[in-house]
Structures are given as structure tokens and as C-alpha cells.
Amino acid sequence: MRASLLSRLLLSSIAASILVPAPAAASSPELIGLERALSKLVAERSGDYGIAAIDLRDGSMVSINGDTQFPMASTVKIAVAATYLAEVDQGRRSLGDMIVGRPAAKVMELMIIRSDNRATDQLLAALGGPVAIQQWLSSQKIPGIRMDRTIAQLLRERGHLADSKDVATPVAMVTLLNKLDNGAVLTAQSRAFLLELMSRCATGTRRIRALLPVGTRVEDKTGTLDGITNDVGFITMPDGRRVAVAIFARGGRDRQPVIAEVARVIYDRFADSVRNALALFMQMR
């Protein structure tokens, strides 16, 4: 009887450890396996890749070249949107404010969904230029991201592959995404507005979204320059778990298909962990 009770308690403890997210642990078997799979994938492809993924449920993270700086290209538009929305939350601006003849909400929609560069620079000018974005990032204690130029200035210059301006590390980008998601920097209303725009991103159908199961919710923002292909955002797993992902690529060939493969590997690893945990729990019953 006592042995039976101890057995049940042990099984209950094991089941609880599976179903309740553990504290962040980069050394967990799940993340070690994911890191190996991602390392192998990008090692077999040409070009230079930076990857970071953070489980928004428990904060655990995996990265490849996570502290290496990569040109952001248009992924910086997330920071521009966040800076404006933070001022909306503070009552200093509104989504109805007119910017060059259009409501700010419409300008932001063009910037995020269509990656409209002119709309971005119009919103940027209203905020006070790149320095305003940098100040906001600093105020939110998000190191590893720097914005130096308007989009027009960025496009006029060359040498993006070796750029040290307008860059971010993958870890810094998912840190920004995490703060946007968890309510640390935006109200629930502003967060919902931004994520809804990102869910309709029309420029990244061949990147993070391309190989994921039909119906998977993705909220992302792409970035593209000569030799640069990026995609960053959120993937929702079948159990509702959300993962923030940043994938930066420069040089080499077939960058979009590789980004799609990376996203699928990340998805499969997290989705499989859910299925495996539930299967083990059912076996214990």
C-alpha cells in the first residue's frame, strides 16, 4: 500500500514536471537538440545566418550566432511602430493623428503590411528621426539594436553586407519581440494593434510562413536589401505556446528557402515536445 502510494506520488511529480513549463534553461534536451539541428542545417548552406528563438511561456532561448550583428533592413520597422505606439499609450499621440495627409494608423499599416518605405520615413520624421527610435530602445534597456539612418538614406548607400549601421543581433531582436508581447512596453490595445498588422504581413510568404502547417498563426516582419534577407516575428504552436523568432541571412544563395526551413525546424521541435509530453503522460495513467 505504502509502495503503491509512493509510486503514484512519483508518477504525479513526473507528469507535473512535463506539463508545467520549467524555468529557462538553455541546457534543456529540447533546446540542445534544436540548436544542433539548426547548426547542421545552416552549416550545409551557403551564406551567413543568425538565428534566435525564445519560448514566450518560460523564457528559454536557443540561438546560432545570436550575438553577431546583422543588417536589419526593414525589420527595424517593428521598432519604429513600437516607438510610435508607446507614445500613443502615453497620450502624446494618437492613431488618428494625420501624417502627410493620412491617419497614423494607415501609415503604420502600409509600413508593416506592405513594408512601404515612404510611409516608414514619414512616420519616422513625425517621431524625430532615427535618434528617437534609438532613445526609445535605450529607455527600454534593449541593447544590441541600433538605428542610424532613414530608409531613404539606407537605400542610397551600398556595402550592406559589411554594414555596421542599422544592425541588430538575433538575441536583441527576440528580446524586443518578447517585451512587445509580454506587456512590458506596450498596452494590451497597442500590442493587439501591432500584432494584427504583423499577422497580415504580405511580403514574407516565402520565408517563416512558407513551410509551416496550413493555419499556423504567424505575425512577422520581413527585411530585404542587396544580399540581405530577414524575417522576424511570432509563431503560435498547436497548444497555444508562442515562440518569438529572428532569422537573419546575408550572402550565399537561396536565403528565403533556408529561412523557411529554419522556421519549420523550430516549429517541429516545439510542436513535437508538446506531443511527446502528452503521449508520455497518457502512458502513465
Image (cartoon, rainbow, N blue to C red):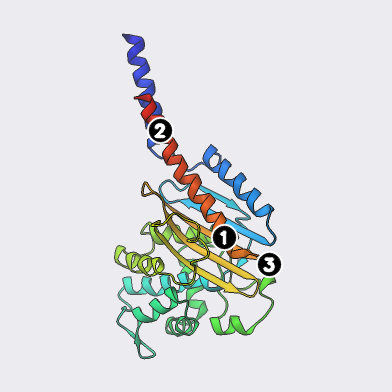
First in sequence, mark 2 or 1: give its number. 1
Q: Residue at x 35, y 25 (%)?
A: 12
Q: Residues within 10 Å of mark 2 (few under 14, many from 20)?
A: few
- Report how many numbered discs are placed on residues in the image: 3
Residue at image mark 2: 279
Give the quadrant of residue 36.
top right
Residue at image mark 1: 259
Quadrant the C terminus occupies: top left
**Can the viewer see residue 150?**
no
Whole-number angstrom distance, CA of label 2 to CA of label 1: 30 Å
The residue at the far front in this view is 214
Q: Which structural element holds mark 1? A: helix
Q: Which structural element holds mark 3? A: loop
Q: Nearer the viewer, residue 180 or 274?
A: 274
Going by the numbered disc 2, the residue's amino acid type is: Ala
Q: Residue at x 34, y 12 (%)?
A: 4
**Can the viewer see residue 43?**
yes
Residue 61 percent across, percent down from the top left: 52, 49
The residue at the far top in this view is 1
Quadrant the N terminus occupies: top left
Q: Nearer the viewer, residue 142 or 263?
A: 263
Residue 16 percent across, percent down from the top left: 37, 31
Residue 188 percent across, percent down from the top left: 30, 62
Q: Nearer the viewer, residue 225 or 129?
A: 225
- Front label number (2 vs 3): 2
Residue 205 percent across, percent down from the top left: 48, 67
Going by the numbered disc 1, the residue's amino acid type is: Ile
First in sequence, mark 2 or 3: give its number. 3
Q: Are marks 2 and 1 in contact (CB under 8 Å)?
A: no
Going by the numbered disc 3, the residue's amino acid type is: Gly
Q: Which mark is residue 251?
A: 3
Whole-number angstrom distance, CA of label 2 to CA of label 3: 42 Å
